[in-house]
Image (tube, helix red, strand yellow):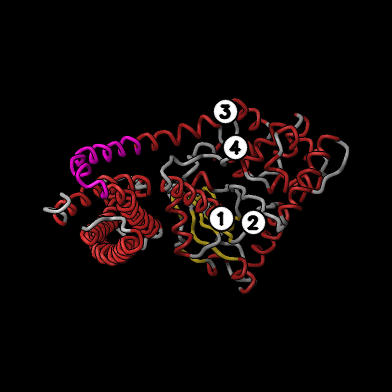
Amino acid sequence: MTQTERPGFDRSDRERAEATDSTRASTAAGGDVLMAIDLADAWSVLDAAERAQGFATLPRSEAEDFFLRLPTRGQAELLLTLPASERRSFARLLAPDDAADLIQHAPHEDRAGLLALLDSATMHEVTGLLTYAEDEAGGLMTPRYARLRPEMTVSEAISYLRRYANQHRDATYYAYVLDDAQHLLGTVSFRELFAANPEDRIADVMRGDPVAVQEDLDQEAVSRLFAAHHFLALPVVDAEHRMKGVVTIDDIVDVVREEATEDIHKIGGTEALDAPYLSIGFLRMTRKRAGWLSALFVGEMLTATAMGHYEHDLARAVVLALFIPLIISSGGNSGSQATTLVIRAMALHEVGLRDWWRVIRRELASGLVLGAILAVIGLVRILAWQAMFQSYGEHFFLIGLTVALSLIGVVTFGTLAGSMLPFLLRRLGFDPASASAPFVATLVDVTGLVIYFTVASVVLSGTLL
């Protein structure tokens, strides 16, 4: 179970700053007892030593609660700064799936030592979890869950579940009915148990043929199953339908956040960061950004090449250069809008590959209307400036018409390109989110120049050109 972020506190910036200053002073003095809420407020601005000092001042019960509320990466970093005598007690607070997540977030050279802190039973469970990839159902699941036999009575099952709940701190939503070979036969919720006749057998009250996920199923597909069925937990089974563990809803909340963050990074034109912004190393972050930025720069070189091709036209009608940023940025913006909308619709399964023709018809109409709106605005602006400042000479209306028609063409093309690129990438087997807004804008920049100067050569032929 991946740990979630600690909830924020509704404080003003001044209060937050005062709490931070107080925390720094207390950690430096080493003697004052901190409130956990103050330490949480200041956590992001403290270095590793200050965090350890502040954590050491918390009463034990508050320290345990604070540790469990930290995100997994924060738990790993804090645990490694604690004295060796304290690491074991805090590591053993974690459920097996949380301990596996913590070990995966720790540096490779520290993982064996952290695994050795666990008791033998938990160590065995965690070792099994570490064999799965982090983004598979097996990597998300907890191996601890309530198991029932089909021949048990409801009364026996309730008695057993009471003992189970007292011994385990993890959330329990359902009980799972297994045969002697650990095959999943059915599920039963606690509400159904309490509503049943105490003498009924579990086999008679359970829900047979339950929805289950394969242990190697991708986490994004698991999240879609949760959304489709509205369960609080789903059992994880192997190829022989033997039950291996349970994925709970809080795990999926983290998965959805991670997947959304990854898509947002890609749409922004960078590789997905695999750590919080302030935690990732400077060189790693630079490498993740440099690749896409370099590719976009090379793409923009084509824009310079296109402008060079129309150098003669620019020399004859310098006024055309004034509107180049206006034209190409409008196309890039419309393309970015379209690609963002389509990528999100794909992520939510609102559209699929078969819907490409419906999308292209919709975006063609949108592009024409949006282009016409910008064309009117652009034409009015040129006419107004000409009336007030005489800025564009005797052929001002033809210049305005050139800009207006170019805006319609560029915005329409940008909208179509932005909406179709995610479909093309999905068809080729790539992540549609790779159709980043900067990439679409770069693509439309080049074509926007071609459209602009083509329209200009037609409209202004015999006058400025």
Residue type at mark 1 is Thr
Pointers 4 and 3 in contact (C-beta within 8 Å): no
Distance (Cα) linking label 2 and label 4: 30 Å
Which residue is disc 4 drawn over? 279
Which residue is disc 3 drawn over? 108
User: Any mark on residue 171, and which?
Assistant: 2
Q: Which residues are magenta?
A: 296-320
Q: Earlier in the sequence, mark 4 or mark 3?
A: 3
Distance (Cα) linking label 2 and label 3: 30 Å
Q: Earlier in the sequence, mark 1 or mark 4?
A: 1
Disc 1 crowd, CA 10 A, few/some/many (<14, 14-19, 20+)? many
Q: Position of residue 107 (x, y in %)?
A: 59, 30
Which residue is disc 1 drawn over? 248
Residue type at mark 4 is Ser
Q: Nearest the camera: 64 or 339? A: 339
Distance (Cα) linking label 1 and label 4: 27 Å
**Image position of 71 (left or right of 333):** right
Q: Determine whether the residue tagged by mark 3 lies in a helix, strand or loop.
A: helix
Q: Position of residue 256 (x, y in %)?
A: 50, 53
Report the residue at 58% width, 61% height from top: 174
Q: Position of residue 97 (x, y in %)?
A: 59, 44
Distance (Cα) linking label 4 and label 3: 17 Å
